[in-house]
Image (spheres, coloured by chain):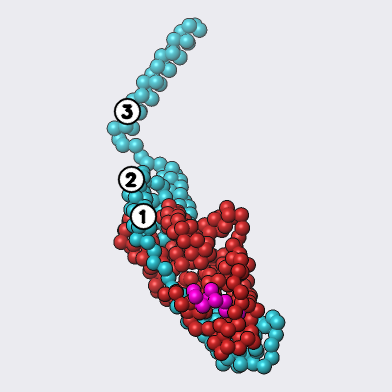
Chain colours: A red, B cyan
Amino acid sequence: MSTAKEKQEHGRLFCRYRERGDIEAFERLLREFEGPLYSYLLRFLRNPTEAEDALQEVWLKAIRRAESYRERGQFSSWLYRIAHNHCLDILRRRGKLVEMEPETEQRDTSVWPDGSSELTKDPFEVLEERELLAYLDREVAKLPPALQEVFVLRTSSELSFREISEILGCPLGTVLGRMHQATIKIRTRFKATGLTPADKKRAMTSV
Amino acid sequence: MSSSQDCTWRGRVILAASGEEPITNELRNHVAECADCHRLYFDLQRLAELRIPTPPVPEEIHQRILRAAREESLARQRKPISLRAWFPRSIPRMAWAAIFLAAVGIGTWQYIRSESQITPLPTEEMDYGLAIVEMDLQVLESEIELSLLDMT
């Protein structure tokens, strides 16, 4: 997570771009944020082409609305607020707030590390990193939108829960509650469905 | 280990597991005693340790964004200077309002002060003024004499 000093520096860089047209300052910010922002857009929109377009649009909006950035606020919160609102617009245009991936795979109990068919395990405990990432990638898409947005924002970026509550415009307690709910749902679904062959395959082929 | 549906420590557990708040002994004891919070704490710690891969952004997109930033910056420089440009954002609006009011106040006070002081006319102007008044009096005297003559 960025330190307070680093966060202040982000704000200063953006102000240098806005007030003096310092392109190098802007590029430094772009290099720092484009990756995590792209990751967030990809995980939220679930479509690489849309995520690429969204990334461009978000930065263009940030450039054109540069005057609306207040130096006292965090640059990252401001940028992610633009990104979040942009995502909501896209999802509204799609006519749905989350795409549910149909479960076509058969549950295979033999994927359990110890061969047990007892589905009482916690994915965060039993799965190796790659398997857990694959599992999360699938399950997060099935979360209700309110929980998904908190979970994705938290895990894709270095935003604190306080910053997330500013971006979403809801109290910190609500954000923490949603993170809790999301974690419970992810854990519970693992108990009910286990790890599927698709998750294993995804884990083997992911970087 | 106890467990509660809606534990009041939950928020602090989440913040501590995510590194946003320090974990106190009190919190540590609670995590040891509450099954839900125990599970939540360790799940979130594991989540925080995960290295979620950040996909590379296509260079073409990066360059397009940079180009747009350059163009927008040039367009901003070409725009006529707006009133806003005179007011640096670093000074809050209230301070600007206070400065403006103070300037108006000082200006008004100076104006009132200047009006109350009768500044003496320079001598030449005074002489000229007196000469005009004298001429007017002479004309007035002549008219009075003429009218008296008419009466007699």
Residue drawn at point x = 33 percent, y = 25 percent:
B131
x then y, percent, for residue B84: 42, 50
Distance from the alpha carbon under mark 3 to that under mark 1: 78 Å
Residue under mark 3: which chain is it in?
Answer: B
Q: Residue furthest right?
A: B5
Position of the N terminus of chain B by quadrant: bottom right
Q: Which residue is labeled 3 in the image?
A: B128
Q: Look at the numbered discs 3 and 1 and tell me whether their residues touch, using CB distance below 8 Å.
A: no
Q: Earlier in the sequence, mark 2 or mark 1?
A: 1
x then y, percent, for residue B135: 36, 20
Q: On screen, B88 above or below A72?
A: above
Is A195 contained in the magenta span?
yes
Is disc 1 on the same chain as disc 2?
yes
Q: Quadrant of residue A146?
A: bottom right
Is disc 3 on the same chain as disc 2?
yes
Within-10-Å neighbours for mark 3: few <14, some 14–19, many 20+: few
Residue drawn at point x = 37 percent, y = 41 percent:
B119
**The magenta segment:** A194-202
What's the magenta bit mostly, secondary-structure-wise? helix
Question: B42 left or right of B81?
Answer: right
Amino acid type indicated by mark 1 = Arg
Residue under mark 1: which chain is it in?
Answer: B
Q: On screen, B127 above or below A196?
A: above
Residue drawn at point x = 54 percent, y = 55 percent:
A90
Query: Which circle, 3 or 1, is nearer the viewer?
Result: 1
Q: Which residue is labeled 1 in the image?
A: B64
Could you say which is closer to the camera, residue B139 or residue B117?
Answer: B117
Within-10-Å neighbours for mark 1: few <14, some 14–19, many 20+: few
Could you say which is closer to the camera, residue A118 or residue B60?
Answer: A118
